[in-house]
Amino acid sequence: MLHRRFLLSLVVALSFSTLAAANSTTVNMTFLYPGTNVSGGYYTYPYYFSINGGKATPMMCDSFNNHISTGESWNARVSGLLSGKGLFGKDIKDYKAAGIIFLGVMNGTIDAKVGNWAVWNLFTKGITTDAAVLALDSNALFLAQHAPSSEFKGLVLYTPVGGSPGHGPQEFIGYRGTAMATPEPGSLMLLSTGLIGIAGLVRRKLRRG
């Protein structure tokens, strides 16, 4: 009987331990390497990270003025994209617009370079005068006004613990799931109208360049 009680206690303890780990909101992230996209002398999406020692996971940075180095590690809080817990606090509309752009980049309808510049420009206003970037921001902000929060399910922020705009490691947008998870089609319905036109504008802009 005592042996059974001990085993039951052990199972309960392990269950709570596993649940606590699953609900943990703090991780350690290590910057492994950037992708091959370079625009204006800056690497753009994707940036590859190891989360808690796991495999390489692509993310998009949203803070233009914060810098990181290959091999650098830090602790980050993981929260929903619209949680209000990011570096830029309660700028939920900007985060929604950033999420819309990020989904478009992941889905292949928005060029990664233009998309990342557009996200940077949302949170660090005035860093570019590129017409394609500004048009993308304008349209994404318009869509953000009407997009329900449910459309951003799966998008998360990795916010450096103790970080702030212009100081410390960057903040990153990621997709909760497999390393290269593609959002469910239903979650991309908000992209079906506005961003298709933007994608065409971006392609024309790139061809002219």
Image (cartoon, grey):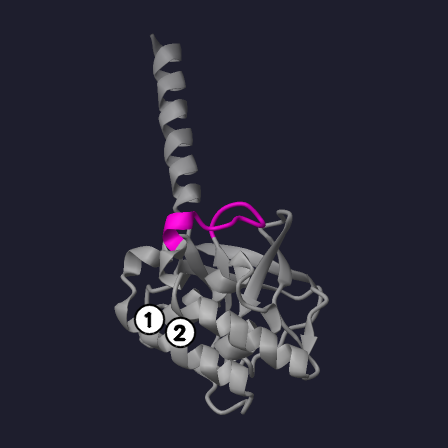
| Dot 2 crowding, Cα within 10 Å, few <14, some 14–19, many 20+ | many
Q: Amino acid at mark 1?
A: Ala
SS state under label 2: helix
Quadrant into which the C terminus falls: bottom right
Q: Amino acid at mark 2?
A: Ala
Q: Is residue 184 covered in magenta?
A: yes
Is 52 placed left or right of 32 in the picture?
A: left
- Determine contact: label 2, label 1, CB under 8 Å: yes
Residue 174 visible to the viewer: yes
Q: Residue at x 52, y 57 (%)?
A: 107
Is 47 placed left or right of 61 in the picture?
A: right
What residue does disc 1 label?
Answer: 144
Image coordinates of residue 27 in percent, x first then y, are 51, 55
Q: Residue at x 43, y 75 (%)?
A: 87
Q: Residue at x 61, y 73 (%)?
A: 113
Image coordinates of residue 111 in percent, x first then y, are 59, 69
State which region is magenta. Answer: 176-187
Q: Nearer the viewer, residue 6 or 93?
A: 93
Q: Quadrant of residue 73?
A: bottom right
Is 7 placed left or right of 92 in the picture?
A: right
What residue does disc 2 label?
Answer: 140
Image coordinates of residue 193 in percent, x first then y, are 38, 65
Label 2, label 1: how far apart the Cα atoms are: 6 Å
Image coordinates of residue 142 in percent, x first then y, are 33, 76
